[in-house]
Image (cartoon, grey):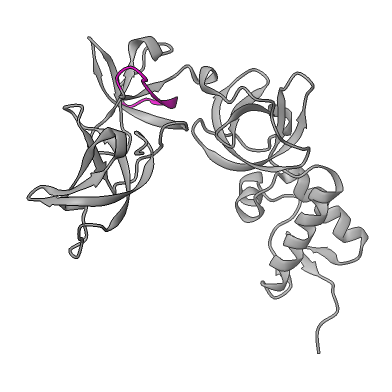
Amino acid sequence: MANIGRWNNLTAVEENSYGMMLDGDEHGQILIPNRYLPSDAQVHDEFEVFVYPDSDDRLIATTEEPLAQVGEFACLEVVSVNPRIGAFLNMGLVKDLLLPFAEQVGKPRVGQRVMVAIVLDDKTDRIVASMRTRRHMDKSPPPYDDGDAVQLLIADQTPLGFNAIVNQRHMGLLYHSDLSTPLEIGQSIDGFIRKVRPEGKIDLSLDRAGYGRVATLSDDIIEALRNSNGFLSVGDKTPPEKIRHLFGTSKKAFKQALGALYKERRIEFEGQGIRLLEEEST
């Protein structure tokens, strides 16, 4: 069965002047227009397509890649506002995505980027957006262990820190006190589970906790030194942004790793950088 608002693998069953008709099972045949077909396409070929209703509410298949699909969250730009029905968001497709008034928080403006859940209206089979993201989070207990690597989507800012959507399923919190650089709403970033509280709330971090974090980062620093003839122009005075760019970690974690390597006599500080002290290979 074809899933509306998601990627599908569908088989061509008929060809016409407009393109190929794909088998959508209970949804009937679904057109994939000629502009999305390879020149050698034939009946019985299988195509990976995104299925959605066109402007006339007819299902259509495309190979264009949307910015998100049903069941996911995304930060999308408002491209227009209709005073009768709501705002429209750029979803990366020919047809823009409706954000109905009932699903808005505040009054989105043209050019603004808003965090939304992509949902399917069960009554109309239309894809719509909702700014009421928490309604659409996974309600099951978070299945994470402390230290698990996760993908984060920065959702909004609070007095405590930044709320982030974890693996497109749950909401967690990155505390301001643990951040060395500012984050942006809609930013996608790697992170880690710091702790899952008994009530299900999730504390997040951008670095691995404890010794495991330092050990992994230390290995990365040594590898970077080896690839740079034993010297890197980074150290205690390096801006946090540069450290994040080079090693994907906070300045606090970076300094901890440098301290560990210095104590182990594997590096020394030289000017505004660090030098590798490992024995040279012969």
Would you say 191 lies left or right of 120 here? right
Point out residue 23 in the picture as x, y percentages from the top left corner.
Answer: 26, 44
Question: Could you tell me which quadrant the C terminus lies in?
Answer: bottom right
Residue 213 shows in this picture:
yes
**Residue drawn 66% across and 41% down?**
191
Relative to 97, residue 10 above or below: below
Would you say 215 lies left or right of 69 here? right
Relative to 272, residue 144 above or below: above
Magenta stretch encompasses residue 118: yes
Q: Residue furthest bottom?
A: 282
248 or 42: nearer the viewer: 42
Question: Could you tell me which quadrant the N terminus lies in?
Answer: top left
Point out residue 269 in the picture as x, y percentages from the top left corner.
Answer: 81, 62
Point out residue 231 in the picture as x, y percentages from the top left corner.
Answer: 72, 69
Point out residue 167 in the picture as x, y percentages from the top left corner.
Answer: 59, 37
97 or 54: nearer the viewer: 54
Would you say 72 lies left or right of 15 here? right
Magenta stretch encompasses residue 98: no
**Residue drawn 77% across and 46% down?**
253
129 or 1: nearer the viewer: 1
75 or 218: nearer the viewer: 75
**Residue drawn 72% across and 45% down?**
251
The magenta-colored residue range is 111-124
Residue 271 shows in this picture:
no
Q: Quadrant of residue 230?
A: bottom right
Q: Quadrant of residue 206?
A: top right
Would you say 114 lies left or right of 143 here? left
Total residue callouts: 0
Relative to 8, residue 44 above or below: below
**Residue drawn 29% across and 51% down?**
11
